[in-house]
Amino acid sequence: MNHTNDRAWEKLGFSPEKVAGFAARDVRWLEFWTVPRPEPDEVENWMSGVALPGSEVFTLGVLGHVIDHDAYRDWRAVGRRFVDDAVFYFLGDWRESFVLFGVQCDRVSSRKELPWSLYMRHSLAIAAALGEWEKFDRLISSIGTDLRWDEATDRQTNEDNQYLMWLAAKLSSRTQEALELEAEIMASRRPRTKMLLKAALAMFDGDGQTFSRALDAYVQAYRVQELRLTTISTGVCWNGTVLYHLAVRRGLPASMLSELNRLVIAEYK
């Protein structure tokens, strides 16, 4: 399914004025989305201020608003480029030596210093939606428990971070690590992360019916509690999108989400 022609943004409550404003802002920022990429010391600022709007262009396209601009009309291509930039951000040679806020960093120390949660969630979801599985696998393999706690810009909790670490461990067959993270999440008081974990566990068990119900419940909670009409990037449920496509990749039938909940899952074939 492809939401491009059904004005999903309107069904979710975004106004035409807001959507037009998001698009205009992203075009302004993306004027600096240049090749070659910046020098090592500037990569983090570039990723947050220049490359990240590329994921918003993808979001607008998924929700049915195509930007009338030669460079960004193909929102799928913009999404692929964002995924490529995420691979560069997480795995590029620039991490071998750079300065961050006056501190010399390398690949190991960068994992304790640099933000990761927002970029990772967006890039994994876009890669999965576009079928870029080789890049998806490379990205998720970079997640480990040595990463810093990252609240990002959308108030991610420690348990939200742990969920991504758990998913990476689970997909990489790091069984003991996954079990320990699972136990910590389940012992927490964070219903959002527990709902997501329940859906993921059903997916790994191959239980399509339980998975569909659990994912629908999680996406419903996301849509009601986290979708903000002042922030277009919340128009996609990033973690839900990743799980949806992982399930399809594993041969589970497409989940039976409600019509409104399905709108915040980035689908493209």
Image: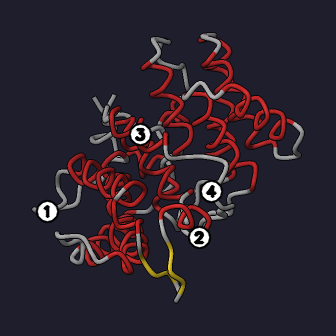
Q: CA distance from mark 2 to mark 3?
A: 30 Å
Name the kind of residue labelled 2 in the image: Glu
Residue 15 lies in what quarter of the image?
bottom left
Q: Quadrant of the C terminus?
A: top left
Name the kind of residue labelled 1 in the image: Ala
Mark 4 or mark 2, earlier in chain = 2
Q: Position of residue 22 (x, y in %)?
A: 37, 69
Q: Residue at x 34, y 28 (%)?
A: 1
Q: CA distance from mark 4 to mark 1?
A: 35 Å
Q: Residue at x 40, y 66 (%)?
A: 96
Local crowd at mark 1 within 10 Å, few (<14), some, or many (≥20)? few
When the figure is inspected, residue 228 is found, relative to residue 180, above or below; the finding is below
Mark 4 or 1, which is nearer the eye? Answer: 4
Local crowd at mark 2 within 10 Å, few (<14), some, or many (≥20)? some
Residue 266, which numbered label? 3
Mark 3 or 4, which is nearer the eye? Answer: 4
Circle 1 residue: 71
Q: Residue at x 37, y 73 (%)?
A: 43
Circle 4 residue: 147
Q: CA distance from mark 4 to mark 2?
A: 8 Å
The secondary element bearing badge 3 is classed as loop
Q: Position of residue 229 (x, y in %)?
A: 54, 62
Circle 2 residue: 113
The secondary element bearing badge 2 is classed as helix
Q: Position of residue 177 (x, y in %)?
A: 71, 34
